[in-house]
Image (tube, grey):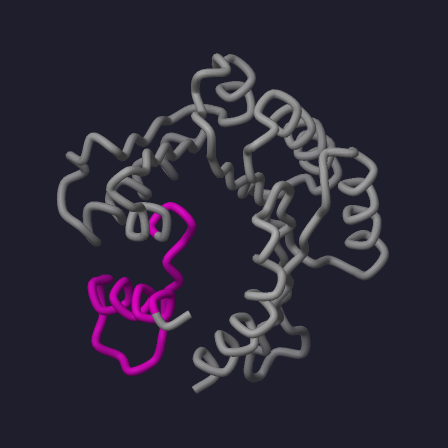
């Protein structure tokens, strides 16, 4: 948890207009993966939109300099179609795929996500798949959880977090659903998410 908060602080210090005491920007999934990758890891980042792809490149270079590491690749491509075309050798004994879709059409993306999760966990059974989703309402979220469980690709571990925003009536809430997660992750998350909320609240 402390490492994660330090990383967020570091990203804010290096961001344009930095110098404020509180966190103003969030280091997204791409920056987090690059910053936390171990020497033996390979990181592959995909985004279908050229403008977003260019922004990601600039942000990562802002954090660590020119993107010259051989263990990090960034492609401007549709990740769903790209993954469907890959050989079994893409992943070794272990791997993690994080799906972070734009959700401009929630229903269509849920269909794609369910299909992709089933494909990934069937083709690479040892793979851990993490899906980010916005919390829209209780009914829709419960339906998503049920449909994930009905895929039959293993246990589903869900972690949700809510951020209360001053002067706004509605809090922001989102979650991550994990399939193929390590067996001890659930017990770790209980304490770590609580600590994370306290640290970010200070």
Query: Is 65 displayed left or right of 53 in the figure?
Result: left
- When the figure is inspected, residue 89 is found, relative to residue 91, above or below; the finding is above
Q: Residue at x 62, y 41 (%)?
A: 180
Q: Confirm whether the magenta stretch covers residue 176.
A: no
Query: Is 155 displayed left or right of 26 in the figure?
Result: right
Q: Residue at x 75, y 38 (%)?
A: 107
- When the figure is inspected, residue 64 is found, relative to residue 86, above or below; the finding is below
Position of the C terminus by quadrant: bottom left
> Which of 145/53 is in front?
145
- In the picture as drawn, the residue positioned furthest to the bottom comes out as 202
Q: Residue at x 55, y 25 (%)?
A: 80
> Which of 126/156 is in front?
126
> Which range is magenta?
3-31
* Badge count: 0
> Which of 74/179 is in front?
179
Q: Residue at x 59, y 49 (%)?
A: 132
Image coordinates of residue 68 in percent, x first then y, are: 15, 34
Query: Is 74 displayed left or right of 128 in the figure?
Result: left
- When the figure is inspected, residue 124 is found, relative to residue 187, above or below; the finding is above
Image coordinates of residue 108 in percent, x first then y, are: 72, 33
Position of the N terminus by quadrant: bottom left
Image coordinates of residue 118 in percent, x first then y, are: 69, 28
Q: Confirm whether the magenta stretch covers residue 12.
A: yes
- When the figure is inspected, residue 149 is found, relative to residue 198, above or below; the finding is above
Query: Is 71 displayed left or right of 138 in the figure?
Result: left
Residue 117: which quarter of the image? top right
Image coordinates of residue 26 in percent, x first then y, are: 40, 62
Residue 72: which quarter of the image? top left
């Amino acid at each position: 948890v402390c490492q994660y908060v330090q990383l967020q602080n570091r990203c804010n210090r290096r961001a344009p207009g930095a110098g404020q005491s509180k966190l103003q920007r969030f280091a997204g999934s791409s920056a987090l993966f690059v910053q936390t990758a171990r020497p033996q890891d390979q990181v592959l980042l995909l985004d279908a939109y050229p403008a977003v792809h260019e922004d990601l490149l600039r942000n990562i270079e802002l954090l660590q300099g020119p993107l010259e590491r051989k263990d990090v690749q960034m492609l401007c491509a549709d990740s769903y179609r790209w993954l469907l075309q890959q050989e079994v050798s893409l992943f070794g004994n272990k791997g993690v795929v994080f799906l972070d879709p734009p959700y401009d059409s929630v229903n269509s993306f849920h269909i794609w996500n369910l299909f992709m999760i089933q494909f990934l966990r069937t083709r690479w059974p040892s793979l851990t798949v993490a899906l980010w989703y916005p919390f829209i309402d209780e009914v829709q979220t419960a339906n998503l959880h049920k449909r994930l469980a009905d895929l039959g690709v293993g246990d589903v571990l869900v972690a949700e977090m809510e951020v209360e925003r001053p002067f706004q009536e509605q809090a922001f809430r989102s979650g991550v659903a994990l399939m193929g997660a390590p067996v001890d992750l659930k017990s770790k998350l209980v304490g770590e998410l609580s600590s994370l909320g306290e640290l970010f609240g200070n």
